[in-house]
Image: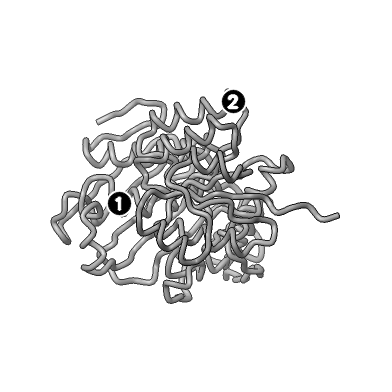
Amino acid sequence: MSKRPLAIAVMGAGLIGRRHIEGVLSEPRTALAAIIDPSPAARDEARTNGLPWFANLAEALTKSGPDGVIVATPNQLHVANAGDVVAAGIPVLIEKPIADDAAAAAGLVSRAEEAGVPILVGHHRRHNPIIREAKRLIESGKLGRIRSINGSFWVAKPDDYFEVKWRREAGAGPIFINLIHDVDLLRHLIGEIESVHAMESNAARGHAVEDTAVVLLRFENGALATFNASDAVPAPWSWERSSGENPSFPREDQSCYQIGGTEGALTIPNLTLWTNEGRPDWRQKLTKEHLPVTHADPLTLQLQHFCDVIEGTATPLVSGREGLATLSVIEAIKGSATTGRTMFLKGKSHD
């Protein structure tokens, strides 16, 4: 006899919340237990489409009994909303970032661990088959010891993007909104980050938040990375434009990460491997190999993984601790850009 679908509630019916709602409705393993959002617009849209709607989690828990909850509310509400879910003993998937403050996130993670409630953080790119293949290759030793990484996020966000007030204010900007994805992937692929040094500029638009940032990262394994991010440059070198992951962005045949090791180099997301035929030698011809990968929607894969976690057959790929670690790197980058100091992830800083 087939198992019943898992009942999943979605808190927050904004842009990303709607994508999660669509995913839950499309996935054979899940059923939509509730849309939880106090806004009249969310209520009216849910009722128009015949979907279950509740103004708050307490009502949903009483009437729908979800097996899992996806928190897709604004960043500043993540800790409070997810905390309520954890208190109810229900597994929770929190959209990235896990919180808007690392200290608050640490408290949430500790409470969940004490209660034995799993937290997943929505760094969905880790579920992308491209990243799975890149990680497999790196762990195989094919690149040797990773020594240097170069990454970029260059896009041109249009003027109307900034008509929304919060996007012009502190807490927005490409470091917190976009670079957090890239930092999470670098941690996943290369290892823990030891220190960062960063600069930022708002010269393109003059908003209270940066439009451009350059970051140096040192990993605990000795690898070094540079990352250049700007949302004021029309260019093809970003995950959004080169991965084909989101159909909202036209795809370009380019890469946004270059990972170099003692035995070879890899570009991502086009998965091109460069090696010498014999021993590494800059005088010798390089060979180029395109690694095959079967593409799939990472949000769908993330939801399926959430189902496995709810059923107890998997542990979170991006746990609360992982989400907290990535957020801590982003806070260090912002701290370095503000102070001009190198920030160490264990709390130290140097001029």
In what quadrant of the picture does the N terminus appear?
Answer: bottom right
Q: Quadrant of residue 115?
A: top right
Q: Please state the horizontal and vertical placement of residue 3, each as a whole percent of the image.
A: 78, 52
Q: Please state the horizontal and vertical placement of residue 166, each as a whole percent of the image.
A: 24, 51
Q: Earlier in the sequence, mark 1 or mark 2?
A: 2
Verify CB contact (< 8 Å) between mark 1 and mark 2: no
Q: With respect to residue 336, does 130 lie above or below?
A: below
Residue occupying image coordinates x 62% and y 28%: 116
**In the displayed structure, does residue 14 sit left or right of residue 307?**
left
Residue occupying image coordinates x 36% and y 47%: 74
Residue that badge 1 annotates = 214
Q: Which of 245 and 197 is in front in this view?
A: 245
Q: Distance between the residues labelled 1 and 2?
A: 40 Å
Give the residue at the far right of this rendering.
1
Q: With respect to residue 272, does 338 lie above or below?
A: above
Residue that badge 2 annotates = 115
Q: Which of 44 and 73 is in front in this view?
A: 44
Query: As shown in the figure, which amino acid type bears the numbered disc 1?
Result: Val
Q: How crowded is mark 1: few (under 14 residues within 10 Å), some or many (20 or more)?
A: some
Residue occupying image coordinates x 66% and y 70%: 292
Helix, strand or loop status at disc 2: helix
Residue occupying image coordinates x 36% and y 59%: 41
Q: Could you tell me if residue 266 is visible in this image?
A: yes
Q: Could you tell me if residue 142 is visible in this image?
A: no
* Marking on residue 103: none
In what quadrant of the picture does the C terminus appear?
Answer: top left
Q: Please state the horizontal and vertical placement of residue 327, each as a whole percent of the image.
A: 41, 39
